[in-house]
Amino acid sequence: MKELAKTYSPQDVEDRIYALWMKGNCFHAEVNAKKKPYTIVMPPPNVTGQLHMGHALDNTLQDSIIRFRRMQGYEALWQPGCDHAAIATEVKVTEKLREEGIDKRELGREGFLKAAWKWKEEYESRIVKQLHKMGSSADWDRLRFTMDEGCSYAVQTVFIRLFEKGYIYKGSRIINWCPVCGTSLSDAEVVHEEQQGHFWHIRYPVVGEPGRYVEIATTRPETMLGDTAVAVHPDDERYQGIVGKELELPLTGRRIPVIADSYVDMEFGTGCVKITPAHDPNDFEVGKRHGLQEINMLHDDATIDCPGTPYDGMDRYEARKAIVEDLEKLGLLVKTVPHMHNVGTHDRCGTTVEPMVKPQWFVRMEEMAKPAIRAIETGELQFVPDNFSKTYLHWLENIKDWCISRQLWWGHRIPAYYCADCGKMVVAAEKPERCPDCGGKDFSQDPDTLDTWFSSALWPFETLGWPEETPEYKYFYPTSVLVTGYDIIFFWVVRMVFSGIEQTGSVPFHKVLIHGLVRDEQGRKMSKSLGNGIDPLDVVDKYGADALRMTLLTGNAPGNDMRFVWARAEASRNFMNKLWNASRFIMMNLDKAELPDPDVLPEGLGMADKWILSRVNSIAADITRNMEAFDLGIALDKVESFLWEEFCDWYIEMVKPRLYAEHDETKGAALWTLKHVLLKALKLLHPFCPFVTEEIYDKLENPEGPDGLLIRAEWPLFEERLSFPEEEAETERVKEAVRGIRALRKEMNVPMSRKAKVFVVTKNPEVKRTFEHCMSFFGSLAFASEVLVQEGKEGISEDAVSIVIPEANIYMPFADLVDVEKERERLTKERERLAKEISRSKGMLSNSRFLEKAPEEKVKEEREKLAKYEQMMKQVEERLEGLK
RNA sequence: GGAGGGUUAGCUCAGCUGGUAGAGCACAUGCAUCACACGCAUGGGGUCACAGGUUCGAGUCCUGCACUCUCCACCA
């Protein structure tokens, strides 16, 4: 048996254990007809940086689930990988190049991509290392990247399929444009921020009627350069006469019509709305309805594009200022009022987004959304917790076409080619040889790339070899559960579901386990700008990976945010140490004796042995249920309190006398039990705290070498032969007595060093037997010099103190310590407590409706309680009587 | 404007299908007991935000309200 250090040092253990698993190929899953598959795809971390606490939570949940299933006997595959994170990475690489004095455009597309790949290699390996540190048992042989060859092929295949089906189209529509990143964005990438702005009221003169004006109100006056109409509500009586007339657009002199459209809210502003179809999504729709011209008045970098005006080339905000000033000079500015409004910003860079009309690629969503909605209705797809299905459904029911093209270089290039001669567009996997229309041979590929989420949407099946019908795909797909945060339900979960159904005919997973955000100790979001982020690896360095994992798993219900509190990490570390020391103690003792056959129940099992065996047995069943329901926090909580309280604080203390005795014929049974229970508990704990459990298991089971590993051990099942309900009940009775004695001694200020005789007085033969069964440890736990179980009070001095437990009185003679007054006070308090219980119980039992309607079992339970309390009350009263 | 959370011990949070409120930390007291002071023992502390309702019985189900967080939404 190997020697264990006095305190557990994760730093000395974790890397070695991880290497052991890697060497043993323990994470690898293969198609195996003899086993059932269990599959989780890892949400691919972005290659933009390192992992944060959210990743730690996400991956700890997945790792715990996959380890549990692996032990249960499934062929458990945890498919890892990274995401190219198009915009985010492009921004980062661009920044890095700029710092090195390199301009992206000068470098050119190819050069930039080279730099981006280098970046990817660096960050990918960093991320993988971090995942190793946290103990992730993903199948690293199958590491994938969203832009690797297979994924690129899958993306191309899907694009072409959807195009041919008419679900992908190219069109000039209004999209969100980020002037800094220089690309279009999907609606999901735009976050609305409330900002303090202004409402400018401006007069537009009516043509041919000097002195007559229409007053509009706007938050973006510069866009008036692109106005092509002013709209009023058709029912608005104030403006009946003016519909159809022309206005002179100030500063440009252009003439624009007044139109009527029910989109206008009569109650808001002046009731007149300037219409800028090229720079506002609503105006765009109005423009379509009325056949208005779309005037694009912005360059891609959000400078003004109005040649011939003084504003041309100005920045949008500069122009806003200038235009307001000019309007004021012309006397057309009526007033400026402060106004809070929502401004769309780019989620990656925070820049205010400009709606613009540009030719882009879109996915038609209406048809594909339908089966994704149905999947929830049929129960094929379930969220845990369930209420997130509402979020999911709401998004799908209000879905709009998805803008998938991006004006970026880092990403999957759109497989569309244009003929240089006639402009014919061909969507195909390869560059066409000849133009089908004009026969031209000169083709250029569309410069745009695809939205990152277009490829992420295929992740659960593309990583398994799809579109090829690989054995892996057939075996491991659809996957078992997806674990992710609620923040990417729209971005990712929804898109995987409809893509999965459309491409593979099946939902990509049946369950979605949703977790929340990890916040800081004050409950704030961890963010770079606040500088309040906690690096999970700092926690690993300080307290170990198991402690980090435990901290993240306990007390966190699915879907809820949690705070990362250092004190909890410390408590988790303490638990590892506790387990370590309990194991150390057991191993020290195992050395000293011959151990019975581990597979056969040994001779000489006592009450305490049967109790703890029975407990670990039933807890194994409980935990299995919790795990299967994704209640990992509850499961872990149960193993922890079992190990610490029941096993360490009670059982180990109970067996110590037997272990220390020179001759005890039940010593073997005790050792057998210690080892059996520890092994079982290690297995139950392993999914959550893999390192410390593996290390102990290694030392406990394989003193010779790393052959059998805990990671491959079988998950404990409930065993009928280890169920001992009677011994459980007996032990609980003894525990109650011990607790009573300890409390009494404490109250009397009797030091532990002062042993006393303990008399258990009972006339009940069962109770008598119970206490006779626990003679080996009852005395030591209760600090007794001697324990006597008897029916009468012989040998007990009058002034002994006593406690009352059901069906028995326990006396301790502390002759010189007893304070009769104090004793009476204590017993009086006990009498009050019992009186309260009795009246509560009687109240319930005298309620005829309770008797009629409550389940029989409950009524019986209550009757038994009442009998117990009444019996105890009698004893207390007798004691009080005796004190007089 | 919609939708969804949260509100339980001083702090951070659990609490499954309704049956006398739990953990960790903190606090108090005692203890170097030969696994562990990253420990052991004992104890104090909660009208489960508020108001109704359903029920024999509600922290748990329903309705309303207050405060708070988050998400979604085109109000110029």
Image: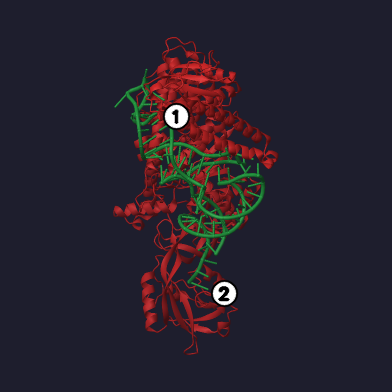
Given the image, what chain letter belongs to the residue carrying mark 2?
A: A
Q: Which chain is green?
A: B
Work out whether residue A683 or residue A228 is closer to the camera in this orientation and state it: A683
Above or below A209: residue A587: above
Above or below B69: residue A746: above
Q: Which residue is mark 1?
A: A823
Q: Amino acid at mark 1?
A: Glu
| Horizontal relation, residue A393 to residue A515: left or right | right
Q: Residue furthest right?
A: A852
Above or below B26: residue A397: below
Mark before the other along the chain sequence, 1 or 2: 2
Q: Which residue is mark 2?
A: A291
Q: Amino acid at mark 2?
A: Gly
Q: Which quarter of the picture shows residue A534? A: top left
Q: Nearer the viewer, mark 1 or mark 2?
A: 1
Work out whether residue A701 or residue A47 is closer to the camera in this orientation and state it: A701
Q: Which quarter of the picture shows residue A178? A: bottom left
